[in-house]
Amino acid sequence: VRFLPLLPMTHNEAAWKRVRGAQELQERWLTHGTDLRDPLRTSVPLD
């Protein structure tokens, strides 16, 4: 059995990840203190 990490993201964050890469998105989440457990959260600022 192999477990893979699941990281919920918004549509905008998914597009950002495709262009900039997963590492940059994770750094944004950390910088902004994003709570990935919150299903009602808004997208992290991507500008």
Image (spheres, rainbow, N blue to C red):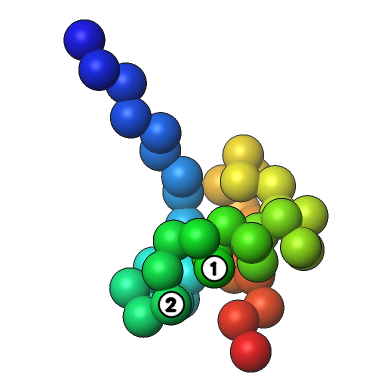
Residue 45 vs 31, above or below: the answer is below
Residue at position x 78%, y 55% in the image: 33
The circle on residue 41 is none
Residue 8 location, x and y as percent?
46, 49
The circle on residue 20 is 2
Residue 47 location, x and y as percent?
63, 89
**Circles 1, 2 touching at the beta carbon (< 8 Å):** yes
Residue 13 location, x and y as percent?
47, 70
In this view of the protein, can residue 10 be seen by the observer?
no
Residue 37 location, x and y as percent?
62, 39
Amino acid type for the residue under numbered disc 2: Arg
Gap in angstroms between the C-alphas marked 1 and 2: 6 Å
Q: Which residue is mark 1?
A: 24
**Residue found at the very far bottom of the displayed protein:** 47
Determine the image quadrant of residue 2. Answer: top left
Q: Nearer the viewer, residue 42 or 16?
A: 16
Residue at position x 33%, y 29% in the image: 4
Residue at position x 21%, y 10% in the image: 1
Amino acid type for the residue under numbered disc 1: Glu
> How many numbered callouts?
2
Q: Nearer the viewer, residue 30 or 7?
A: 30
Q: Secondary structure at mark 1?
A: helix
In this view of the protein, can residue 23 be seen by the observer?
yes
**Residue found at the very far left of the displayed protein:** 1
